[in-house]
Amino acid sequence: MIPILDLTKQYEQIQSEVERAVLEVLKSGQYIVGKHNKALEKEIAAFCGVKRAVALNSGTDALHLALRALDIGAGDEVITTAFTFVATTEAIGIVGAKPIFADIDPNTFNLDPNQLESKITAKTKAIIPVHLYGQPANMEEIMKIAKKYNLYVIEDCCQAIGAELNGQKVGSFGDIGCFSFFPTKNLGAFGDGGMVTTNSDYLADRILALRNHGGAVRYYHDEIGVNSRLDEVQAAILRVKFPYINEWNQKRKENAYKYNELLKDVKEVVTPRELKGTKCIYHQYTIEIPNRDAIHKYLQENGVGAMLYYPVPLHLQKVHAYLGGKLGDLPITEEKTTRVLSLPMFPEITYEQQKTVVETLKKALIECKATA
Ligand SMILES: *Cc1c(COP(=O)(O)O)cnc(C)c1O
């Protein structure tokens, strides 16, 4: 089986460093918000080119607390994409605001800036673009619209640490950037973890307080917060892994280009397209293919761990039924959810494995009699 992601190879590469770091934390007696937390925040802020970063328990909490820090809640609307993981809109729901879905750009699967203005109402407070699969959304256009209508922008960078648009890192365009260190992400912990980035000291300090029961000073509480601290073991592991992120992202990109080459004569397959001026980090390598469900099944049965991200767009999920979304609302999102297929992608995947994936895919196309 060639899995969608194999973390064991990466562990072999960094095993001794990780084990040393973890043991050091275990011996230190400092398990929550210690020196590794503070150092990781500084390192990620510098990497993203922002003033501040705050470590949290997950990417979901990063989104949730970003909304809280911007005072977005009941009665407010937040425009986002339905072509993402549910955590993006879950965070909007948690604070009591309403997600409003806009359609995506057919080439990049990210929010189409041209679809935004028609969704803006007097209640709109923010836009949450998602840099899906490690491809930056069109932030320049999105920021122009946000400025024109005086809206906040929260970037969902959970799949895109290190991705760039015109030399600028994601997480530094909007008011707040939200990152996840879930183990399968490009920078993954050995458990849950997350981070926000911002150029605002006010927002960073507010999130620092919110993550720790709503108070900047211990046992003095100003507002309802949460417990969303990153534990020190995870922070130490992330600091071991972080220096490798550029190398790992680069390898993913090289592997993506190898897939492009191997697939270039397969006329039924649409390979990923990059927005001009972007550095994509290929969290996923996602193709479009006809007869997708049959092909997916064939690949799964024949040793290729291809995956569907995501099979049901968010406006058609039961959790959002109260919003009254229906088939036909977001034609491009709906079409793409029937066509996308993510192939095994990780820095250590070998060329032999990639060739096997593509050979199996070609067989699947014949077996499933797919037509372009
Ligand atoms: C993973 C992910 C999240 C949530 O991150 P967690 O750390 O799992 O809470 C949010 N948005 C997107 C796009 C993601 O891929």
Image (spheres, helix red, strand yellow):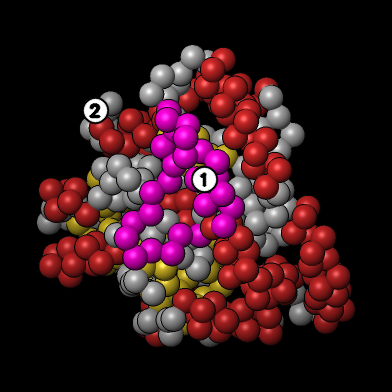
Q: Residue at horizontal 71%, vertical 43%?
A: 352
The quadrant the C terminus occupies is: top left
Are the residues at dot 2 and dot 1 in contact (C-beta closer than 8 Å)? no
Instruction: Find out whether residue 19 is within the magenta segment.
Output: no
Q: Residue at x 67, y 47 (%)?
A: 351
Asked if the magenta segment contains residue 272, the reply would be: yes
Q: Viewer-proximal residue, 139 or 354?
A: 354
Q: Secondary structure at mark 2?
A: loop
Which callout, 2 or 1, points at the residue further toward the start of the chain? Answer: 1
Q: Residues within 10 Å of mark 2 (few under 14, many from 20)?
A: few
x and y, in percent, of residue 195 in the image: 53, 69
Q: Range of the magenta residues?
A: 254-281
Q: Residue at x 77, y 55 (%)?
A: 9
- Cβ(mark 1) to ligand 1 < 8 Å? no
Task: Determine which of the numbered discs, if any, sits on residue 356 in the image.
Answer: none
Residue 221 horizontal side relative to residue 346, left or right: left
User: Residue 298's x, y, as percent?
Assistant: 61, 21
In the rendered view, would you say 337 is above or below 81? Answer: above
Residue type highlighted by circle 1: Glu
Q: In this picture, is 202 found above or below 136?
A: below
User: To which quarter of the image does residue 51 belong?
Assistant: bottom left
Work out whether residue 40 can be spotted. Answer: yes
Q: Is residue 208 visible?
A: no
Quarter of the picture holding the N terminus: top right
Q: Front-most of 15 and 205?
A: 15
**Residue under label 1:** 261
- On the image, the x and y values in percent for residue 82 come to 35, 42
Q: Residue at x 33, y 31 (%)?
A: 334
Q: Foreground residue, 116 or 349?
A: 349
Q: Which residue is mark 2?
A: 328
